[in-house]
Image (cartoon, rainbow, N blue to C red):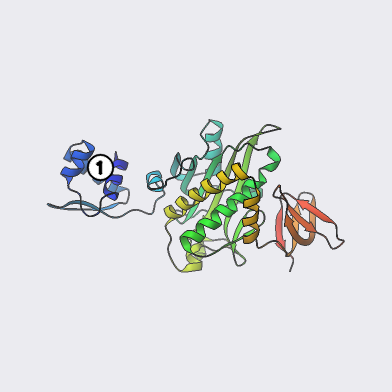
Amino acid sequence: MQEQILQFLKEHDGYLSGEEISHSLKMSRTAIWKYMQELRKVGYEIVAVPHLGYKIVSVPDKLFPWEIQFGLGTKVMGQKIVYEETLTSTMDTAFELAVAGSPEGTLVCSESQTHGRGRMGRTWISPKSKGIYLSLILRPKLPPMETAKLTLLTAVVVSEAIQKICGFEVQIKWPNDLLVGRKKLAGILTELHADPDRVKFVVVGIGLNVNTQSHQLPPGSTSLKLETGQTWSRVSLIQEMLKEWEQWYSQFTRRGFEPILKRWKELSVTLGRRVRVSDPSGVIEGEAKDIDTDGGLLIRLDSGLILKRMAGDVMWAQ
């Protein structure tokens, strides 16, 4: 019922009397007063003026599901949202929900993570209420070897969302980092559950430094606030991500990978550079020539031989 009251207040300009709310939502004035008190306790600033009624002055900087879904307009992405103040990892929670049958588009988000994860067992530092820590459940009709495409798709999604909300362009470093200059702004983690011939589900995780201060970040990282000098709405950023996800993922299922790959290359800071790539098979160095149709990085060695890598750490060699 709190969500209904909030929506009712947001959809009307100015003040709304308790009588109007009572009549529209069919509840007593006393019940409305109690709900207003509960909303104030979780951070909503609601003023009450005699003979005028109630008005929302400000909303808390929290990733409440009803705030993310208000005016969202998507059909699949974010239609189910699981939110907790603190989680060990949004990836772990999303994976459990996916195993239990949660539908495609289910979003898990939290204000902080005690054991946030990056690629290759690394830790993602998650200061409370400063960044975006979320995981999304996808159920693509793909063979397991093609799931790397979803990492590239997600990089495009986050880049486009930041461009539309914040007005500046970030660059993508293969396979899963978003950069401003040489500083890391966001990371992407993709985990799947699959049979040998088909994917059952994929969980895509994002860690994005939004309003994080420099002392809260690891070396070599940055945040949207540090880059722009502004504080940004995390809710607006998540809403835009979900809209971009819906658009690009739908396009992927209808038209294939080519449109995504084209946009990814436009945003790439990897291609055309001399790189050093390390993975369990060893270290290679050469020019990052291209991304193939599976999402793999093609590296031309000094000998002229071209090798493909589907994963690994990339360092600029110059």
Left-right relation of 47 to 299: left
Above or below, comparing residue 123 to residue 81 in the picture: below
| Residue lying farthest to the right in this orientation | 303
- Residue at numbered disc 1: 35
Residue occupying the point 58% across, 50% down: 154
Identify the image quadrant of the C terminus: bottom right
Circle 1: residue type: Tyr
Above or below, comparing residue 269 to residue 70 in the picture: below
Left-right relation of 216 to 27: right
Rendered location of residue 155, percent (x, y): 59, 53
- In this orientation, does residue 114 appear? no
Left-right relation of 36 to 132: left
Residue occupying the point 49% across, 67% down: 226
Residue occupying the point 42% across, 52% down: 235
Crowding around mark 1 (Cα neighbors within 10 Å: few <14, some 14 to 19, many 20+) is some
| Most foreground residue, 171 or 293 | 293
Left-right relation of 305 to 60: right
- In this orientation, does residue 119 appear? yes
Rendered location of residue 232, percent (x, y): 43, 60
Identify the image quadrant of the N terminus: top left
Rendered location of residue 216, percent (x, y): 51, 61
Rendered location of residue 141, percent (x, y): 62, 36
